[in-house]
Amino acid sequence: MTVSSTRFPRLRARSIRLLTLLALLLSACPVLAQDWTYRVRPGDTLWDLGGRYLKPDVPWARLQAHNRVADPYRLPPGTPLRFPIAWLRVQPAPARVLAVRGAVQARLGDSGALRPVVEGERLGIGTHLITGADASVTLAFADDSRLQLREHSHLRLDQLSRYGHTGMVDTRLRLDQGRSSNRVTPAKGPASRYIIDAPTATSSVRGTQFRVSAGGQGRMAATEVLEGSVQVGNRRGERRVAHGQATRNRALDARPDMPEALLPAPVLVRTGLRLDPLPAQIAWETVAQATQYRVEVVRADQPEILVFARDTADTTMTVPDLPPGLLRLLVRAVSADGVEGLDAQADFEVRDQPAPPLTVRPVNGETMASPRPRFEWSQVEGAASTVLQVATEPQFLQPVLDQEGRGTRVRAAEDLPPGDYFWRVASRDGNGHRGRFGQPVALGISDAPVDPGLQPPQAARGQLTLRWQAGEPGQRYRVQLDKRGDFAQPLLDQQVDQPEVTLKRPWHGTLHVRVQTIDDDGYGGPFSPAQQVALPCRTCYGAGAGALLLLLLL
């Protein structure tokens, strides 16, 4: 029978995988032949210990014979008892989902239906995990070892078991695609294992922190060790990789490369680092041999839980909104073949309380004619003051206004040039702690002339009345009349509560009129453009002054 050339590579790859798995199983035989040692405690008996730790088909009498115990009724405290690993009770130990970010799916076996992964659920042996773009999932195993599976990754849970109450666990995983970060609890006995099988090599540890890349898409398969050491090998040989080193795994038919030092941690530029308020700004110095950088934000108390991740070729980045809590920034250099280096890190806190106020005015998209608008918001329980920011872009990287006020409204402390802006507010409690900012609100500042809506003058019985459009409740008005139009020495300069003014024995000829609105806090807005009023002579005033027109100067 002839084997086609298209089938041969598949058979060869399958054979290589079977040989690797066989080697992995054979490596377990010495462990199974070892003993787990238990120190006798007061009140212990052989039958109690046998029922607690031994498989149901292993009688406690075999434990007595194995340890040459003469009197099973008298076990001196502190006496070591040896339990053969092969006799120990083995139980399933499902993995627990600690956190999910983005689209993460799971299926049981190779052909099961995909379903969303939910935080808090338990995943058993044979589960496949698949992460989408900008997604991650964090798992906790029986000994509290943690695994973070990154974006575009495929992981299979091959073995999840524990040896009764001994504290020893057997965790075996297969990373077919993508990347994982691992923090492994130190082993508590000879049978404790944590193994990740990738396409070109297997990484096994007994307590360390490391990352594994399955390779592909221009990235080299690699194991990167951050703490402790990791044994990396395949059927061609093994390498022990110490902390601060990485080994590249090119193929199953090639021994893993000699370990090399990881790229150093980038140096954060403190003058370009702003982690509060959000959005955060980050800057770092260039690392030699780096083609790009990985920026992550994780939980400071549980750094395996990823809340933000981006890859970039730049040395600056803006991090958008983040969940509240004590967080940790991580920045690492990445080589041309995708091997990631050591982390630069900085801890910071995002506060969620006190809550941001609800904005009242200006409303979103409103255009204000005043260069110093007044901002209003709702009252927040527990807020002692409010922080106002105005910027020309919605990320507020460089606010043009940053001021604090008490109460529920404040006027801009300085003039804002005409243009488009965004404003937002945050609350500060009595201890000085500022909460997070609310959503940005779009605002326009216009220098277009203000039209007061002056009405045609009304004349009757020697009086002339001027009226204009009413403003908001609580506002007052300042009206000026001038003969020449420069208002250097106005004929009338008066403040009134109502949008009108009545003149007795008015002047004749052409007068210039302008109106200013004054808010209840005393701030006067810009004067309206001057408008002309043509007044007739006094003798003819009473007969026909009602026909005067008010011309608007543009």
Image: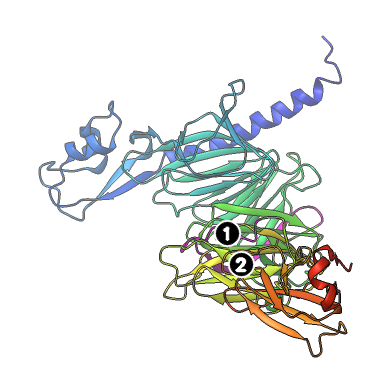
Residue 176 inside the magenta-drawn segment: no
Image point (64%, 49%), residue name: 212
Q: Quadrant of residue 495?
A: bottom right
User: Which element carries disc 2, helix, strand or loop?
Assistant: strand
From the viewer's perspective, is 87 left or right of 485? left
Local secondary structure at mark 1: strand
- Look at label 2 and name its amino acid: Phe
In three-dimensional space, the C-alpha distance between marks 1 and 2, rounded to whole angstroms, equals: 8 Å
Please indicate whether residue 480 sits to the left or right of residue 245 in the image: right
Look at the image and tell me whether residue 448 can be seen.
no
Amino acid at pointer 1: Thr
In the image, 197: left or right of 449? left
Instruction: Give me the disc on residue 359.
Output: 1
Q: Quadrant of the N terminus?
A: top right
Residue 375 is tagged as 2
Q: Position of residue 389 (x, y in %)?
A: 64, 70
What range is drawn magenta here? 336-363
Give the residue at the far left of this rendering: 73
Q: Is residue 339 magenta?
A: yes
Q: Residues within 10 Å of mark 1 (few under 14, many from 20)?
A: many
Query: Could you tell me residue 245's position as x and y percent?
Result: 66, 61
Task: Pick whichever of labels 1 and 2 is earlier in the sequence.
Answer: 1
Q: Nearer the viewer, residue 180 or 361?
A: 361
Residue 356 in percent (x, y) is at 52, 61
Q: Nearer the viewer, residue 158 or 536?
A: 536
In the image, residue 3 above or below residue 520? above
Contact check, label 1 and label 2, Cβ < 8 Å: yes
Q: Is residue 330 left or right of residue 260?
A: left
